[in-house]
Image (tube, grey):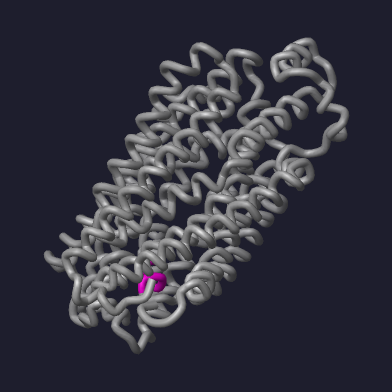
Amino acid sequence: MLEGPLLGKVFLFALPLMATNLLQMMYNAADMIVAGMSGVEGAIGSIGTTGAMINLILNVFSGFAIGTNVVVARNIGRGDEKATRSAVHTSLVMAALFGAVCMVLGLFISRPLLAFLGDEGRILDLASLYARIYFFGTPFMAVSNYMIAIFRAKGDTRTPLFVLTGTGLLNVGMNLFFVLVMRMSVDGVAYATLIANVMNVLILGLIMLRDAGWCRLEWKQLRLDREAMRDILRDGLPAGIQGALFSLSNMLIQSTIIGINNATCPGGSAVIDGNAAATNLEGFAYVATNAVYSAAVTFTSQHHGAKKYKRIGTVMRCCYFVTAMVAVAVAAVLLLFRHPMLGLYLGNGPKAEDFAASGTLQQAWMRMCFGVEQTKFAISMETAYTRFYVMIAPYFTLAFMEVGSGVLRGLGKSTLSTIISLLGSCVFRLLWIFLIFPLWPTLTMVYLSYPISWTLTALTHFTVSVVVRRRYMRMYPEENAAEVL
């Protein structure tokens, strides 16, 4: 990573990671699609309503996994074998502890929190059942996430790809078995996810036990090293807090969408289902661009450890270029094939031209209330279309925001990155929902809060990362004098 041209290396690093992320999203999409095949009313929407609440808890230890990535990559860049080994084993112990805490917390608060967000009746029962089973698997999920972060830190994105491909196929197979054979619903989908996470830990752990390098897993070294834990917490805690607060703002938006659904057609789930389907497909765009974010973190961290700050300018240009191409390509595919892809989640219905002429969303709601056939499908599709048009088309702004955040974290400014993200995204969205949305209470106004906040945050991240990099260059002029941009 530290020598020679960078564009090809960034792309080759991100490509397997992107494939890994996309495969994971395919398996998540399969969860929701197979749950819909159970024929249980509200199964898709109930899973969708748990997303923000689950992420509120999971993003804490996911943030610490970012800390593991940064610290291990930085130590590798410095050539410090002892510190690398210490960080690897400390992070795995932390993962097990954090995962256990998240499991207990999730089991206790999931149903009250879902009810607080607006879930009610059958939707609340299904969502609570899914969340309870899901949280039983959080210790395994945490450990596997940290293991994957270790592989990425040393530049290996292929091993996680192969492992997750196999366990993902297992996940899909178990989904079909539990739902179609055992006649289960959201509980079957949750059990399949739990089994897949257990297998991830077992396989990745065996590979790390056989590793001949600095990241080899040795049972006798599994302990909390104070210095390594401090470094991981310093770089990971801001990311964890950012993820949790992002989830809080998303929970507020989710609650607003549930409120719209409940107020217009009590007892139905058309708006919730449409939003859940669009959100799940939107996840493909996010995980694709997030692969470049991970590349930005890893490449910047290794260069930061080697004090090659002038060359980080090239890292930034390469990452922004790659993430722009990825964001535009994935958004184009999602928009072009939106109708057949959404149909996988929402079932069969009228052709696109049949509901495209159905009028406004409010008019569709009125038709549903008066019992017109297939208006539930029309409402769900129109909800999903609205989210697509407003959020997917400008998705490159989120990609730029992620890369800027990754560069700052790689430069050791994780807290600064978190502050910028929280102000530009979370605080802005909260103000938008409380001040702007009441003036025009439509789904479009809810969704508009996202691309506007992405743009503001991306510009700030870029500006600050340039300033920080140049400051480091002035601090180490000799190390960077011979570097080529």
Query: Where is residue 150, by image quadrant?
Result: bottom left
Magenta segment: 149-153
Main SS of the magenta part reads helix
On screen, residue 391 versus residue 242, left or right, reads: right
Q: Which of the two residues, 318 or 271, is positioned nearer the viewer here?
A: 318
For the C terminus, the image quarter is bottom left
Q: Position of residue 353 (x, y in %)?
A: 87, 31
Which of the image's four quarters has the N terminus?
bottom left
Q: Can residue 306 be seen from the camera position used here? A: no
Residue 222: tell me if it is visible. yes
Task: Decide if residue 38 is on the left or right side of residue 89.
Answer: right
From this viewpoint, which residue is outermost toward the left?
Answer: 226
Q: Is 341 included in the stretch rendered in magenta?
A: no
- For the point 67% across and 29% down, the residue is 383
Q: Position of residue 82 (x, y in %)?
A: 18, 80
Give whichever of 349, 469 is nearer the camera: 469
In the displayed structure, 357 sits above or below 32; it is above
Residue 440 at x, y percent in the picture: 55, 14
Pinpoint residue 143: horizontal percent, then vertical percent. Answer: 36, 63
Which residue is located at x 68 percent, y 46 percent? 33
